[in-house]
Amino acid sequence: MRNAAGLLFLFVLATVGCNAGPDYVYAPDCPAGQYALPEQKMLSHSNPVFIPIADSHNAWETVVDVVDDYFRIEREEPVRRIGDMLTEGNITTAAEISPTIFEPWRYDTADAEQRIENTLQTMRRRAVLRVIPAQGGHWVDVTVFKELEDLARPEHATAGAATFRYDSTLSGVENPHVGGQATAGWIAKGRDASMEQYIIAHLLSRCGQTGGSPPATICNSSRAPEGAVKQ
């Protein structure tokens, strides 16, 4: 039993440390034996980002191919030519439950911290992209939303299941608002900037671009602080 627990612990460490996502972003430029704190991994690409593909069809196919590596596309509105004008393209993906540390083969979460959060509580993500024609290429705006599942009580909880509750009273609703939006069971948690950066870096790599120099990293030659990542 102890050996099994030890093997499970090593698997979790390997999953979190080595499978946080595809290798499309810059690593901190620290010498051997030195460390960088996770928060020093600053964002290195602008959003929206310019991709130098002038042909609208090729640009659209490139964006779709990249997004499909991370999310299941639910709706596409390609860039179209209407007369002398090019319309803006849009991609919307389906909201999917985010992977845990036990799913290293999935890349729709960017880093280990996010995977740990997904493991401890149910999260889901969806992406919305805009492809805007421009001279000499296209601007691509990437937005990844993450949401937390909203449950009335923890799943499989047994505490108080057979106890009558007296902390609420019956209430009536007068003049209800017709057409009001009911709760969808999910709480918006803002944008996932790290996942947006992974997608943008992947797009740039497909175009043969790097997006500029990697961000400066403050290295620490002393003993690695708690929570540091060894490079």
Image (cartoon, rainbow, N blue to C red):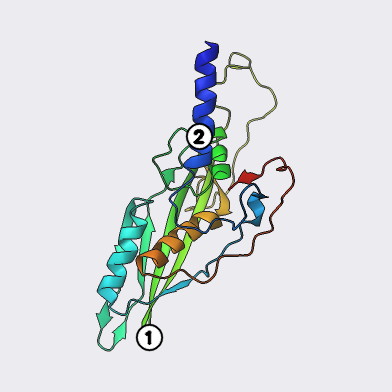
Disc marking residue 115 = none
Q: Is residue 124 visible?
A: yes
Which picture quadrant has residue 74?
bottom left
Residue 156 x, y percent position in the rendering: 52, 21
Residue 215 x, y percent position in the rendering: 60, 65
Crowding near the residue tagged with mark 1, few <14, some 14–19, many ≥20 C-alpha atoms within 10 Å? few
**Does residue 148 appear to the left or right of 217 in the view shown?**
left
List the single residue furthest toward the front.
32
Q: Which residue is mark 1?
A: 135
- Looking at the picture, tell me which residue is in the foreground, 97 or 173: 97
Q: Residue at x 68, y 55 (%)?
A: 219
Which picture quadrant has residue 116?
top right
**Does residue 99 appear to the left or right of 41 in the view shown?**
left
Q: Which residue is mark 2?
A: 14
Residue kind at label 1, given as amino acid type: Gln
Q: Residue at x 71, y 40 (%)?
A: 226
